[in-house]
Image (cartoon, helix red, strand yellow):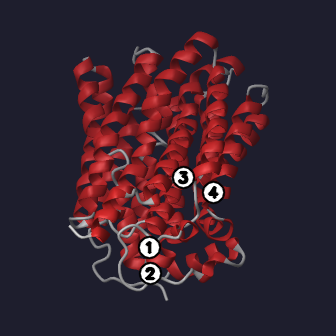
Amino acid sequence: MSPTRTARFSRLHYAWIAAGVTFLTLLVAAGARATPGVMLLPVGNEFQWSRATVSSIVSINIFLYGLIGPFAAALYLRFGLRRTMIAAMLLLAMGYGLSTWATRYWQFVVLWGFVVGAGSGLAATVLGAAVASRWFTARRGLVMGLLTASTATGQLVFLPWLAAAVTTNGWRAAPWIVAGATLLAVPVIGLLMRDSPRDVGLRPYGETGVPDAEPAAAFGNPAQRAMAVLFEAVRVRDFWLLAGSFFVCGASTNGLIGTHLISAAFDCGIPEVRAAGLLALMGLFDLVGTTASGWLSDRYNCRYLLFGYYGLRGISLIFLPQALLGPTAGLAVFAVFYGLDWIATVPPTVKLTGEVFGREKAAIVFGWVAAAHQVGAAFATYTAGTVRTALGSYAWAFIGAGALCLIAAVAVLPIARERRALA
């Protein structure tokens, strides 16, 4: 082995440190996003609010979380990854910390809806896409899978802890836990995160050939940049297929299961802590499934991967109402099959976005695709709460989301058959 090759293998590329810090940031942000699902029932009980009322607060949070995404991608270019990540953690800490004193609906809307929603949007899946694209040439799909899996890990770490704290000490314990965790992440980001490989005198991991020039988009108004890319993207058919399928993804994951599964399980006589454990189990399988999805997206046709993911998810959701009413084994089966592809759709969607729109604009375009994801999540959050209030059951909300997934499975097949990058 040559000395150059030996040196390359003996030294850890800083890209892996940047990915590790990003994983931690996304993990804590995922815990913050999962928190309302644990507090939905106790907050409603304390203030005598219906499921629809509390769900409307969470739907605002999820909608803003998605809307911020494309602008966050432009902010990463304008102000850098490190500053934006720190701002996200501070917003999450402030929103949840102050919410422990909230007593009125509008106060929860401002704090949970707008402040936490904005912080979540700055530390969303689009952050993982930006880091993977900026720091990695080789292993990009695998890294995107690992960063996306941080959402599952966040659930696995936080949900049982939060559910036990809420059961023992009331719902206000959960926001304090999240506020503390986000504040602890700030010094780690400040000390270790770097904005690009050039900051440490390196090239992206695995990159060969002539180095790319520094993107001109690093300067200028981030909002104008995000809107300009959107106006170009909407003229491409594949953008609508990507955004539409991701709308369904959001409607069938954090908007529905992440927000309402604990409440639906409680309606069927399953204790909240056990239901939170079910979500954590799903998170464990999602960690495996999403990481594997990143590996697969480097090797296989991403359209067919998405077809399989959406189809499996649709069948799982249609089965869920029966599983909630049946024996425990049925819920375990649902947790395994649904968990394996909860957010496994992200790595192939990110890769297809890059194939269609090019590397330079992929993060911003994916930000708009992710915005559609959160519009779908907000829609499902509010709709499922309304269905439960009107019918006394979540069954039709789960079945409807499953049917949407089956439609999305077919809709993704034409994506990227003709590659077209934005000029």
Q: Are marks 4 and 3 in contact (CB under 8 Å)?
A: no
Say above or below: 178 vs 13: above
Q: CA distance from mark 2 to mark 4?
A: 32 Å
Q: Earlier in the sequence, mark 1 or mark 4?
A: 4
Residue 129 in the image: above or below residue 117:
below
Answer with mark 3 or mark 2, whichever residue precedes in sequence.
3
Circle 1/circle 4 CB separation < 8 Å = no
Marks 4 and 3, Cα distance to the nearest angstrom? 14 Å
Q: Badge 4 is on which residue? A: 82
> Is residue 382 or residue 336 the one in the foreground?
336
Q: Position of residue 184 (x, y in %)?
A: 63, 36
Q: Are marks 3 and 1 in contact (CB under 8 Å)?
A: no
Q: Secondary structure at mark 3?
A: loop
Residue at point 33%, 41% (across, down): 286
In the drawing, does residue 224 fall left or right of residue 193? right
**Contact, CB < 8 Å: mark 2 with mark 1?**
yes
The circle on residue 115 is none
Residue type highlighted by circle 2 = Val
Q: Residue drawn 71% across and 21% down? A: 47
Q: Residue 422's spot in the image, x, y percent?
A: 47, 85
Tell me where residue 181 sits by quadrant.
Answer: top right
Q: Can residue 391 be seen from the camera position used here?
A: no
Q: Secondary structure at mark 2?
A: loop
- Residue 239, numbered circle: 1
SS under mark 4: helix
State the residue position of label 3.
124
